[in-house]
Amino acid sequence: MKKGTVLVSGGAGYIGTHTAVELVAAGYGVVIVDNLANSEACAVEGVRRITGIEVPFEQVDACDGQALRGVFEKYGFVSAIHFAAFKAVGESVADPLKYYRNNLTSFMNLCALMHEFGRSDVVFSSSATVYGQAGVLPVTERSPRLPATSPYGNTKQMAEDILRDCCAAYACMRGIALRYFNPIGAHPSTLIGELPRGVPQNLVPYITQTAAGIRPCLSIFGNDYPTPDGTCLRDYIDVVDLARAHVAAVDRMTQGRMEASYEVFNIGTGRPVSVLELVEGFERANGVEVPRKFAPRRAGDVPAVWADTRLAARALGWQAVRPLEETLRTAWAWEKRIRGIK
Ligand code: UFG
């Protein structure tokens, strides 16, 4: 049976495209909204090829309230997933207004229009960054949010609060914030994946570009952390598993299963993996070498963070299922495809 239609803002991006695919697979209609500020139109083509559906795409900047209103007038969705945001931590420190303006204006526009048009369900793309370096690991949804260490992280906390307050105030609105840990990998079809512009800031794109010979050497930032091998511990979640968590969140809302008007879930695997383990796992999974060296710690990195995933499992009926090895294979398959490597 066909379910309702979901607006996916930032739907041409890395996580947005994978989520659009999983929504269609689950029987939802999808409208992609994206200004292509940090994505390419070919990503939407990838979604269309995988799903076999001419998924509607509106090239609209969610910061432009009038243009976004046009999308609300044109389509009859009841749910929205908001991905549209800048996400480079360092850039946000250098140019905070760019981040506050873009990430918050787009989200407030979306919430205001949802309220005005009487459309109820909003899923917000949040981040484990809100926990900072938690005192107790793994982190649960009840772990305190620590003061953000970057404007980027602050926009995630502020947007969570905006959604929480809207859901408390407006009877028609419900919200779920999904706190992602470290999304990695690509769709097994290799038709969609991450397309970082310039030098990658995140570990896996840097690894794949190094393996492809685009970067001479991976720098491992810090090997003197208080962790088993001295490198940082993270919770790496396959992007397809992550995409399915969004479907589970929309299901929960549309099926009236929420226990409060605003809920928060950790989306991770529950398994800590060190930087060294990840690099070595990538080499083993793909039979390629990644030249690497140890480098000083990167400012702002926390030594260790991973998710307690029990609440998501119980409430969303969702858990990560893809083995890390397979995820690392998709990451390499995607890099090879976009570089034309055999
Ligand atoms: N790392 C390296 N070398 C690199 C890149 C990263 O050693 O070239 C290390 C980092 O120091 C860190 C680990 O790899 O220990 C993971 O780094 P990422 O940049 O891939 O991921 P982060 O955990 O720093 O960041 C992720 C998201 C951010 C989000 C942050 C906090 O990518 O958007 O989690 O939630 F803000």
Image (cartoon, rainbow, N blue to C red):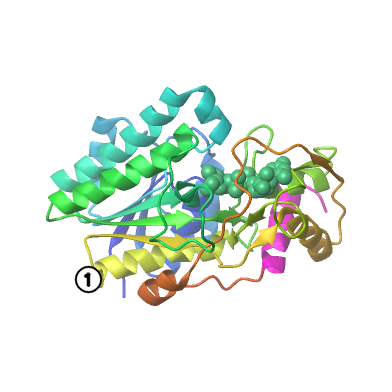
Residue 74 location, quadrant: top left
The x, y position of residue 53, in whole percent, is: 44, 59
Seen in the picture, residue 153 relative to 311 is either above or below; the reply is: above
Residue pictured at 86% horizontal, 56% vertical: 288
Q: Which residues are magenta?
A: 324-342
For the image, the number of numbered tags is 1
| 274 sits left or right of 13 in the view | right
Q: Nearer the viewer, residue 288 or 139?
A: 139
Quarter of the image with the C terminus is bottom right
| 120 sits left or right of 52 in the view | left
Quarter of the image with the N terminus is bottom left
Q: Is residue 287 visible?
A: yes
Residue 216 location, quadrant: top right
The type of residue carrying mark 1 is Gly
| SS for dot 1 | loop
The x, y position of residue 84, in whole percent, is: 41, 41
The x, y position of residue 275, in whole percent, is: 72, 53
Seen in the picture, residue 203 relative to 65 is either above or below; the reply is: below
Q: Residues within 10 Å of mark 1 (few under 14, many from 20)?
A: few
Would the CB of label 1 be found within 8 Å of ligand 1?
no
Residue pictured at 87% horizontal, 53% vertical: 289
Seen in the picture, residue 19 relative to 32 is either above or below; the reply is: below
Q: Main secondary structure of the magenta part?
A: helix
| 151 sits left or right of 198 in the view | left
Q: Is residue 189 magenta?
A: no
| 207 sits left or right of 314 in the view | right
Q: Nearer the viewer, residue 67 or 283?
A: 283
Q: Identify the residue position indicated by label 1 in the image.
A: 256
Seen in the picture, residue 127 relative to 90 is either above or below; the reply is: below
Q: Is residue 340 magenta?
A: yes
